Amino acid sequence: MSGRVVTFGEVMALVRSTNPGMIALTRDAQLGIGGAEGNFAVALKRLGTDVSWIGRVGQDSFGQMVTRELRAEGIDVHAIVDTEAPTGMMVKESRTPKNTRVSYYRRGSAGSRLSAEDLPAGSFQGAALLHVTGITPALSASARAATLYAVESARAAGLTVSLDLNFRSQLWSGQDAAHFYRRILPLVDIVFAGDDEAALIVGTNPGPTALASALADLGPTEVVIKLGDQGCYALVDGVGHLQDAIPVSVVDTVGAGDGFVAGYIAEYLRGEPVRKRLLTAVTVGAFACMVPGDWEGMPFRSELDLLGAKEPVSR
């Protein structure tokens, strides 16, 4: 299988403190963009997979920054410019050298106003896979309806559908999230979840093997449980696979899960076996952890072997 990937959701302006401490007292910060679907799209494109992103931005400088950055990465951008709502914002505060606090300013944002009507006709023409996350349906009722519409339309068009649960407690309750997950999982082919996210659906955390089996019972043929620095466990067509993480010096873990998913999907579309998909997934996730920012550390395919290189300097 090969072909283009389609994803949609909110990409926001990102303000990140550059030094540990209270952001109320900092005088230095960096401006960029962030958001799960955008991070995923960047990682996927750098791995050589064509990808389209659909979303809403405000008629403001932040919206221009979002679309310029994504286009600069070679992503096919379909951005609706909302004249009545601002581009959302995310603030990352390094409260201590090892703890990051993320705050969202996205209530009433352009991205939260995404609707089924925003998906252009022919969105899935020539595409092989639709990727969605559990963040978009948490933003609003219209975004939730758009997610279901997109998934149903993609399935009708013969696309593979993947879902990263990506639960965000600041956006909706665990109960509401679990209700939506149970509704959409029968329509999904590949699902990615942290063990804590999977436990929202199952009710307990009996371990990755049992969690994957329980999620597979709801419909997906491929279930990948992300276990952070412990690696991951995948259940594909009834066969289990374990993959260790790649140890690195962690700077910022935000975006690592999105890179992980992109690594798996990129190899899936190239027809690679499960072992290869998981190895690339943990490799991309490791790269994302080593630099500040949500997507800047995503590797190009030519760089995937760098973490195993014996020499620190390439000449």
Image (tube, rainbow, N blue to C red):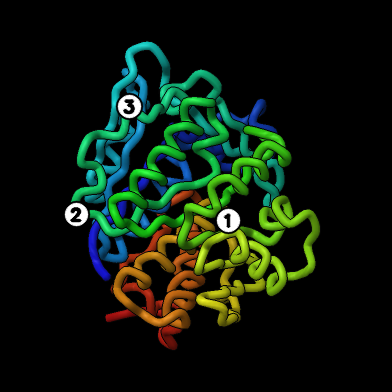
Residue 313 drawn above or below residue 51 = below
Give the mark toward the camera: 3 or 1. Answer: 3
Question: What whole-number distance in Å separates the C-alpha atoms at marks 2 and 1?
Answer: 34 Å
Question: What whole-number distance in Å separates the C-alpha atoms at marks 3 and 1?
Answer: 34 Å
Q: Residue at x 56, y 38 (%)?
A: 17
Q: Which residue is mark 1?
A: 253
Judge from the rendering whether residue 213 lies leftward or rightward of residue 296; answer left or right: right
Instruction: Indicate which disc residue 117 carries.
Output: 3
Q: Nearer the viewer, residue 121 or 92?
A: 121
Q: Residue at x 56, y 78 (%)?
A: 238
At label 3, which amino acid type do we have?
Answer: Glu
Q: Residue at x 22, y 35 (%)?
A: 121
Give the mark toward the camera: 2 or 1. Answer: 2
Residue 6 drawn above or below residue 62 = below
Q: Contact, CB < 8 Å: mark 3 with mark 1? A: no
Q: Contact, CB < 8 Å: mark 2 with mark 1? A: no
Residue 53 drawn above or below residue 215 = above
Question: Helix, strand, or loop for circle 3?
Answer: helix
Question: Helix, strand, or loop for circle 2?
Answer: loop
Question: Helix, strand, or loop for circle 1?
Answer: loop
- Quadrant holding the C terminus: bottom left
Nearest to N terminus: mark 3 or mark 1: 3
At label 2, which amino acid type do we have?
Answer: Gly
Judge from the rendering whether residue 31 lies leftward or rightward of residue 1; answer left or right: right
At label 1, which amino acid type do we have?
Answer: Thr
Q: Residue furthest bottom?
A: 310
**Residue 43, position as x, y percentages in the image:** 37, 58
**Residue 142, position as x, y percentages in the image:** 47, 26
Q: Which residue is mark 2?
A: 126
